[in-house]
């Protein structure tokens, strides 16, 4: 199950990058400074997603979580106070799509990091230890 969660995290990070790339070409290439930040976010998401598929270490998962939380924080700042003179609206189809993807990445990254430190993961009533051995799900082991 941890491998499935890692793949899902990688694909969702790549999807977040792809959404920002689309939004850059759709509108944000016209917005001073923020447009460049969208392009940097897109590149970071696509590269980080590929690295998550290639590497299995905790540092990549931590980077994915940081990417998601940082992107969400930047979005909230831009909707609440504005960012470099641009103020975004909080609701909209693209905002909800990107926010949902990034929130899911943050939650999956937290679960993967927690599983790594606990040496087991409980998802849907199954337990898998660090060696991939499956067993009965328990709260304490």
Image: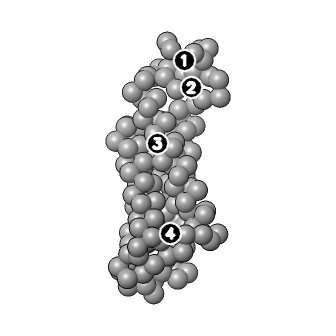
User: Does residue 42 lie above or below 126 as drawn?
Assistant: below
Q: CA distance from mark 3 to mark 1?
A: 20 Å
Q: Looking at the image, can residue 51 be seen?
A: no
Residue that mark 2 sits on? 122
Q: Residue at x 48, y 48 (%)?
A: 106
Please name which of the two marks, 2 or 4, marks the residue nearer to the observer.
2
Q: Which is more N-terminal, label 2 or label 3?
A: 3
- Estimate the x, y position of residue 7 in percent, counting from the top left: 54, 43
Q: Secondary structure at mark 3?
A: helix
Task: Residue 139: give its label.
Answer: 1
Q: Secondary structure at mark 1?
A: loop
Q: Which is more N-terminal, label 2 or label 1?
A: 2
Q: Secondary structure at mark 2?
A: strand
Please name which of the two marks, 3 or 1, marks the residue nearer to the observer.
1
Residue that mark 4 sits on? 20
Q: Are marks 1 and 2 in contact (CB under 8 Å)?
A: yes
Q: Residue at x 51, y 55 (%)?
A: 102
Q: Residues within 10 Å of mark 4 (few under 14, many from 20)?
A: many
Q: Secondary structure at mark 4?
A: helix
Give 18 or 125, whichever is nearer the viewer: 125
Q: Quadrant of residue 19?
A: bottom right
- Estimate the x, y position of residue 111 in percent, counting from the top left: 49, 36
Q: Which is more N-terminal, label 1 or label 4?
A: 4
- Estimate the x, y position of residue 13 in percent, counting from the top left: 50, 54
Q: Residues within 10 Å of mark 2 (few under 14, many from 20)?
A: some
Q: Are marks 2 and 4 in contact (CB under 8 Å)?
A: no
Q: Which is more N-terminal, label 1 or label 3?
A: 3
Residue that mark 3 sits on? 109
131 lies left or right of 97: left
Give 24 or 91, whichever is nearer the viewer: 91
């Amino acid at each position: 199950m941890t491998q499935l969660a890692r793949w899902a995290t990688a694909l969702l990070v790549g999807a977040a990058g792809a959404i920002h790339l689309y939004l850059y070409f759709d509108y944000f290439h016209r917005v001073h400074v923020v447009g460049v930040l969208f392009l940097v976010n897109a590149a970071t998401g696509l590269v980080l997603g590929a690295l998550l598929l290639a590497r299995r270490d905790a540092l990549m998962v931590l980077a994915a979580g940081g990417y998601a939380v940082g992107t969400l924080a930047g979005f909230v700042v831009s909707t609440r106070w504005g960012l470099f003179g641009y103020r975004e609206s909080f609701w909209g189809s693209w905002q909800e799509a990107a926010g949902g993807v990034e929130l899911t990445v943050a939650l999956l990254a937290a679960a993967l990091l927690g599983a790594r430190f606990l040496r087991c993961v409980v998802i849907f009533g199954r337990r898998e230890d660090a060696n991939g051995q499956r067993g009965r799900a328990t709260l304490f082991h």
